[in-house]
Image: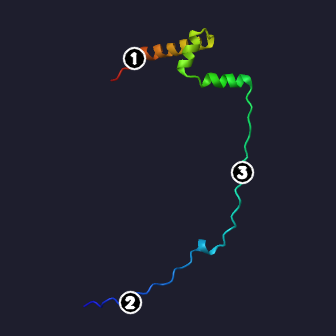
Amino acid sequence: MSDPVGAVSQSPPVARPSDARPRAPARPAQSVPSDTVQLSSQAQAALQEATETAAQTAKEASQGDLQAKMLLAKQAAARADAESTTHVVA
């Protein structure tokens, strides 16, 4: 026959090692250093060309921009080459 369970006593919580260490005083928030960058006009123009949308390129090409015309021609040639490539699946 089993004995009935009597009063249950809990042991006091044991301090964890991380709780035993004294904490460092809170430091005030430090500002993050920032740098200022100045781009040359050529770098700004290159950045603008690199981030230009297809619609903007087409608009510039229609207005006579040679660089835009050459880019559109290059893209058209790449598309034509990709479409003419035949893939054989065996």
SS at badge 3 = loop
Please identify, in this view, whether the residue under mark 1 or under mark 2 is nearer the observer: 2
Q: Which residue is mark 2?
A: 7
The correct choice, above or below, for 81 with respect to 4 in the image is above
Three-letter amino acid code of the residue under disc 3: Ser
Residue 31's disc number: 3
Q: Mark 2 belongs to which amino acid?
A: Ala
Q: Please give the name of the residue rendered at 60% of the width and 25% of the height, measured from the top-left corner.
A: 51
Gap in Å between the C-alphas at discs 1 and 2?
Answer: 84 Å
Badge 2 density bin: few <14, some 14–19, many ≥20, Cα 10 Å: few
Give the amino acid type for the residue marked by disc 1 in the picture: Thr
Most foreground residue, 24 or 71: 24
Circles 2, 3 touching at the beta carbon (< 8 Å): no
Tell which of 7 and 3 is nearer to you: 7
Tell me residue 62's x, y (percent): 56, 10
- The residue to which callout 1 is attached is 86
